Image: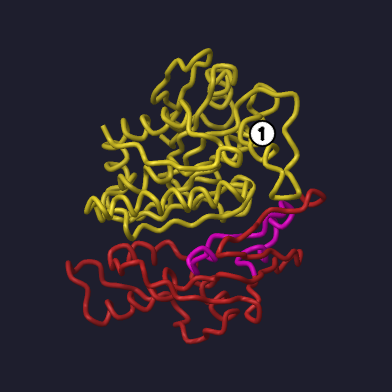
Amino acid sequence: MKFLTTNFLKCSVKACDTSNDNFPLQYDGSTCQLVQDESIEFNPEFLLNLMDRLDWSAILMVASDLGNTSLPQQKPVFNKDNDELSEEDMIILKDFHTLLIQTNIVEGQMKCRNCGHVYYIKNSIPNLLLPPHLA
Amino acid sequence: MLPTPYIKCDYDKVYEPSEDSFLLLDSLEKDLEYLAQKFKNKLALVCEIGPGSGIITTFMIQNHIPTTNNNSVYYAFDINPWALEATLDTVKLNRAKDNDNNNAGSKSSLLEPVQVDLTSSWRSNQIDLLVFNPPYVPSETIPTRPERKEELDTWVDLALEGGKDGMEITNRVLAQLDTILTPNGIAYILFCARNKPEEIIKSMKENGYSNWNIELVKNRKAGWEVLSVYRFSRC
């Protein structure tokens, strides 16, 4: 699954919804196997729109779980009034393309920071199903 | 008329595309203009619950529904692991065919499968376009999720059987629509006549959904069933 998807997955346990710790999930850096998928073309307009949608603190937390602590503390702001993005903006967007779209977690595990339930990623597919006694 | 995706799946494992799947394709096609207007060139997070063979998600990817210029991310949510694999395969198969035909449009679309129960593991208010062909056949009970991937019959039953009035699963989604969709979000959901969709919608309107537009997009007689697709959005 793409790094991007970590920005949307929360714990499936309903009781955790009242906690602030059910999102993002905590990714286990030692088991997470990352693979770069370069088949998807860089689309600056798409990235620009996508940035608006991101929960930045969750991006920072998951990146740090996975060993990347080099991201800016604040979400970068882009000047959208201009028709053309500056060269500098393009470089930043390209970096986020690499992080959000090209970085795939193919195997690994993550857990809820509230209840501790562990979820697995296998063959790039995250499994958020709960065992019957928790569902 | 937009082409129907090419499908080659093992129907012992996933639901075979049928009249209901095709009615959803036709509904999305009918609403192409409407959706393009609604989303313009903004980002759209698209989610299909229960994609089965992947026919609908593939159709949306191929035809750039709802945004015209590759500004969508497609999520496939299913509890059935076979359905997620089938969806990946179907998208790949059609992508290869599109490449052969020099229609490179669907080449770089983003498809993400998630094994999950409906939208229970998704951050609130983060889906722009939701498409759901639910298990809508009335049944005594809803089958229990198999423990093993090999219990093929039960996986397929789960795609069909909807409990009382065939509405037990759909009702879970309807009750959550307000927290599933973005403020501008839209859902397309399929019903059969035995689900009593008109009653359901009347009751929704009276219970918290008075500020929603709920409209019939298309209906069709299919054998002894009458199927309909409704569109849900905030006023």
Identified at 36% across, 57% down, the residue is B109
Identified at 45% across, 15% down, the residue is B221
How did the renderer colour the structure?
by chain
Identified at 57% across, 32% down, the residue is B208
Outermost residue toward the top in this view: B224
Figure chain in yellow: B
Figure chain in red: A
Where is A49 relative to B24, above or below?
below
The chain letter for the residue carrying disc 1 is B
Looking at the picture, tell me which residue is in the foreground, B219 or B11. B11
| Prevailing secondary structure of the magenta residues | loop
Q: Position of residue B13 (x, y in %)?
A: 60, 42
Q: Position of residue B141 (x, y in %)?
A: 75, 28
Looking at the picture, tell me which residue is in the foreground, B175 or B54. B54
Q: Position of residue A98 (x, y in %)?
A: 40, 76
Identified at 67% across, 66% down, the residue is A21
Left or right: B136 as drawn, with respect to B151: left
* Residue A23 falls inside the magenta stretch: yes
The residue carrying mark 1 is B157
Where is B121 relative to A77, above or below?
above
Where is A7 relative to B158, above or below?
below
| Magenta stretch, residue numbers | A1-25
Please count the marks in the image.
1
